[in-house]
Image (cartoon, grey):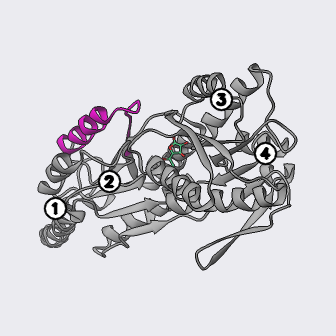
Amino acid sequence: MFKNHRRRWLGAGIVLLFAAAVSSGCSLLSSSGDSQENKAITIGFSQVGAESDWRTANSISIKETFTEKKGYDLIFLDAQQKQENQVRAIRSFIQQDVDYIVLAPVIETGWDTVLKEAKSVGIPVIIVDRMVDVTDESLYAAWVGTDFRLQGEKACEWLKAYADKQGMTGLNIVNIQGTLGATAQIERTSALEAAADRYGWNILEQQPGEYTQARGREVMEGMLGKYGDIDVVYCENDNEAFGALEAIEAAGKTAGPDGDMIVISFDAVRDGLWDVINGKIALDVECNPMHGPKVEQIIMRMEEGKKPAKYTYVKEGLFSMDDSIESVKVGENEYKVKKVTEDLINSRPY
Ligand code: GYE
């Protein structure tokens, strides 16, 4: 906010000077004809990495929103899933005196110091995707993302309804978690643990799969080697599910409604939905990565000197292999479950 006030006062000063200059017959515009008002809005974006299809779609959304043609100068830095790279990126944005910092934090903790540095020089920070756990919420101006706990609860209520229809009780579940300490992992895992307590399910093992296909496969190989009675594989994103499916098939087992086990996943990226159509993934809980337009709305409001909403949620749905369960109830709300078709997949932006 301070930075924007600075830019606005500067703009006002130029108008007064310009008026004085015009009245005295000289011009204030630079040789390139570029005045302060035409200056691009500089945005430093620290992205987690490129670990998953979802992350790729999220990066595309930001890059397609903040283009040079629309008056932005986007500095995009990929942290390869390392927090120290994100801290370094934020410090470089501060040195470059960007107008806004956008951060997709790899994990929730460890941000107070560097966000205080950004605040001390008046650069607003907008958080996207996962959340930051900071002592002072004024260290970020706004957040855009999704309710990860609700995603997990939707998945577990679908699983309960599915198990009831199949006459299955006491489910044996393996949980391939996301990156430990990431909001998506914390919340999707806790929703499963709460449901397991509520419904008497048995979580055989929980291991982080880092949201990658390679690690998802390695973790599933280990679990298949230990357990011969897995009913459900609860993967915390599609790329882990792809890896788990590779391991299941390599072990001579099958996933699907008539298979040895079912796979539940999150993200609902295009390739994940293709696996839903063929039953390899029974349920895919959408996690909408299209944050760019929402972040732009926040920046536009701040450019006008207005206070943005602190928390903005993106919309998302539930996708299943069949229409046996039409909706799930979480709390007071009902959520429709859509059967995946080729037309549905072809109509989606990611
Ligand atoms: O589920 C996964 C990505 O934070 C919601 O991170 C995001 C998660 C998403 O790697 O694919």
Q: Which mark is residue 276?
A: 4
Disc 1 CB within 8 Å of nearest ligand 1 atom: no
Q: Earlier in the sequence, mark 2 or mark 1?
A: 1
Front-most of residues 338 and 162: 162
**Measured Cα–Cα span from mark 4 to mark 3:** 24 Å
Under mark 4, the amino acid is Val
**Measured Cα–Cα span from mark 1 to mark 3:** 82 Å
Q: Quadrant of residue 8?
A: bottom left
Q: Earlier in the sequence, mark 4 or mark 2?
A: 2
Q: Which residues are magenta?
A: 74-95
Residue at 82% across, 50% down = 321
Relative side of 51 to 133, left or right: right
Under mark 1, the amino acid is Cys
Q: Is residue 269 visible?
A: no
Dot 1 corresponds to which residue? 26
**Measured Cα–Cα span from mark 1 to mark 4:** 68 Å
Q: Earlier in the sequence, mark 1 or mark 4?
A: 1
Residue at 57% across, 56% down = 152
Disc 4 CB within 8 Å of nearest ligand 1 atom: no
Dot 2 corresponds to which residue? 132
**Measured Cα–Cα span from mark 4 to mark 2:** 32 Å
Q: Residue 339 at what x, y percent from top left? A: 82, 57
Disc 3 CB within 8 Å of nearest ligand 1 atom: no
Q: Which mark is residue 227?
A: 3
Residue mark closest to the camera, 1 vs 4: 4
Front-most of residues 104 and 156: 156
Is residue 149 depicted above or below 335 in this figure? above
Under mark 2, the amino acid is Val
* Magenta residue check for 81: yes
Q: Residue 79 at what x, y percent from top left? A: 37, 33
Q: Earlier in the sequence, mark 2 or mark 3?
A: 2
Under mark 3, the amino acid is Tyr
